[in-house]
Image: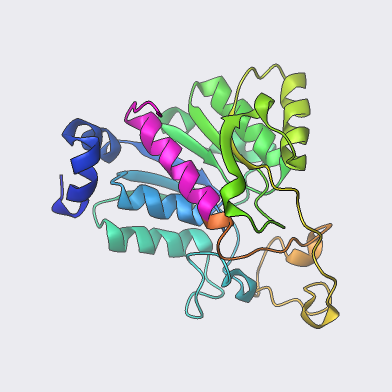
Amino acid sequence: MSRQFARTQLLLGPEAMEKLAHSRVAVFGVGGVGGYVCEALARSGVGAFDLIDDDKVCLTNINRQIIATRKTIGKYKAEVMRERILDINPSADIRVYKCFFLPENADEFPFDEYDYVVDAVDTETAKIELVMKAQEKGVRIISSMGAGNKLDASAFRVADIYKTKVCPLAKVMRRELKKRGVKKLKVVYSEEKALTPLEDESISCRSNCVCPPGTQHKCTDRRAIPGSVAFVPPVAGLIIAGEVIKDLCEIKSA
């Protein structure tokens, strides 16, 4: 094991580090939450990644996404994250999918090869399909619930989907997964009540869209554009990464 992960090995031990080095984690959605998942997994010694995201870095991502800088605007998020991971761990095996995960293309992804799936996508349809596909293949999965329109990073919790409360997205997921016979799903959710974004036409994406050319899913396509800050979505991503690491290493939480 490389000395760059020596401080992690002091806590996890050599056997755990070997497990991480030989694990493949698929991260669906490399944005405000998913980007920090990738960052922490890479710095913890995970050896292989599948990165799935069709989006490009936008000016409005700079306030919260770890892959967003002035130099990366207009580049595919998954490609930028790939380069960042390789700067951390040059021996990492990384596959990039510049596409949007949907039920229609779910069979194009090698779920049989995944040791863990991270759901950090925005849409309910994609989230549900990810859960169903992971369940079908017997792959562990953790899902991020809503992280937008929030200011209290300390309100995040790790729980089974059926024990969540407050979060509107979690409520929808509970209902839809129950219909489909899903018995359990580990999620990270917030118990903070969502705030209502201010209406400010001077910075409105609807009237002043700054999405890069070629962006497939523009902000103007959304029903509502959530507010976000630098100190909330990253915390959700780091919590998710911690759960993945502990599960892969079979470490029981206190």
Q: Residue at x 45, y 65 (%)?
A: 80
Picture coordinates of residue 187 (x, y %)? 59, 35
Q: Does residue 98 appear anywhere in the picture?
A: no
State whether the magenta stretch is mostly helix, strand or loop.
helix
- Quarter-of-image position of residue 249: top left
Q: Which residue is drawn at 62% across and 47% down?
A: 121
In the displayed structure, 59 sits above or below 225; it is: below
In this image, 147 relative to 117: left or right? right
Q: Please tell me how many numbered marks the rendered image carries.
A: 0
Q: Nearer the viewer, residue 194 or 216?
A: 194
Magenta-colored stretch includes residue 134: no
In this image, 116 relative to 192: left or right? left
In this image, 232 relative to 17: left or right? right
> Can you say which quadrant of the picture contains the C terminus?
top left
Magenta span of residues? 235-254
- Quarter-of-image position of residue 184: top right
